Amino acid sequence: MSYQDIEQQESAVSRTGLGDRAKFITKTYNHLLGAIFAFVAISFYFYQSGISQAIAQWVFSFGAGWMVLLGGFIAASWAATHLAHTSQSKVTQYSSLIGFVIAEAIIFAPMLLIAANYASSVIQSAATVTLVGFGILTAIVFYTRKDFSFLRGILMWAGGLALLAIGAAFIFGFQLGTWFSVGMIGLAGAAILYDTSNVLHHYPEDRYVGASLQLFASVAMMFWYVLRLFMSGDE
């Protein structure tokens, strides 16, 4: 079953109620929690072992380093999501999730290193804001049981504009300031609403690994831009 087929499914909640999807939802959020813990553990290992320093040195010594990292993130996100949603093999689905978590840890390594060295409390503050925001958005979906699948087109359009802005900033050498971070936090929040709605209404019950990967990607994006916003304010 393709991702488009998932989007076209009739709402499972309206048909059978939340109770029949409780097991799937529990598995999804357990896997999301596991992915977050794994990301934290890998990032801590990178920092303690000096790998973060090596990644940062490469990024700062190579003019296009940040763009390569962001391009790698986009490619890893697409490939991992595609495999997690379409593969019938649980091994492939789990490999996609694990690979994406590692890719995210690599992407975050330079920024987390800078934050740890120059703004000691900013990582904890950004993580707290991200988790609180995620909790509020999740509660909205589960309380209202609203189907936010209409956000898909908006997210695709806004995501395309964001990529265009990042590319233009690299080519023309201007900085993406505070308002860009604020806008991307809003985009990540909309993605969380959309992903959570799909968990509640649309995902097939054997796709909890793919669902958790999608949620993790949205949470990671929110954390990235909350951290970026906090660091720019600290400066």
Image (cartoon, rainbow, N blue to C red):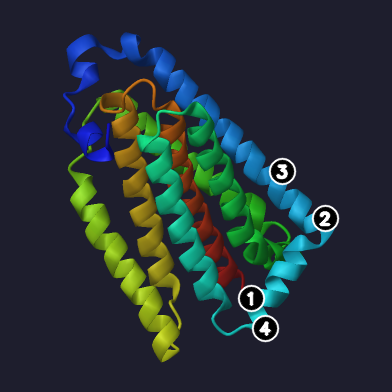
Q: Residue at x 36, y 20 (%)?
A: 205
User: Disc 1 vs disc 3: Cβ atoms closer than 8 Å?
Assistant: no
Locate the C terminus by quadrant.
bottom right
| Residue 231 image position (x, y, % from top left) | 59, 67
State how far apart marks 4 and 3 are (Cα): 27 Å
Residue 70 placement, left or right of 35? left
- Quarter of the picture holding the N terminus: top left
The residue that disc 1 covers is: 59
Kind of residue at badge 1? Val
Determine the CA span between mark 1 and mark 3.
Answer: 22 Å
What whole-number distance in Å separates the C-alpha atoms at marks 2 and 1?
A: 19 Å
Checking the image for residue 41, the label placed there is 3
Q: Is residue 118 visible?
A: no
Q: CA distance from mark 4 to mark 2?
A: 21 Å
For marks 2 and 3 on the same chain, the one whose residue lies earlier in the sequence: 3
State which tag comes first along the sequence, 4 or 2. 2
Q: Which mark sits nearer the N-terminus, 4 or 3?
A: 3
In the shown orientation, is residue 73 left or right of residue 46?
A: left
| Disc 4 + disc 3, Cβ < 8 Å | no
| Label 1, label 4: how far apart the Cα atoms are | 6 Å
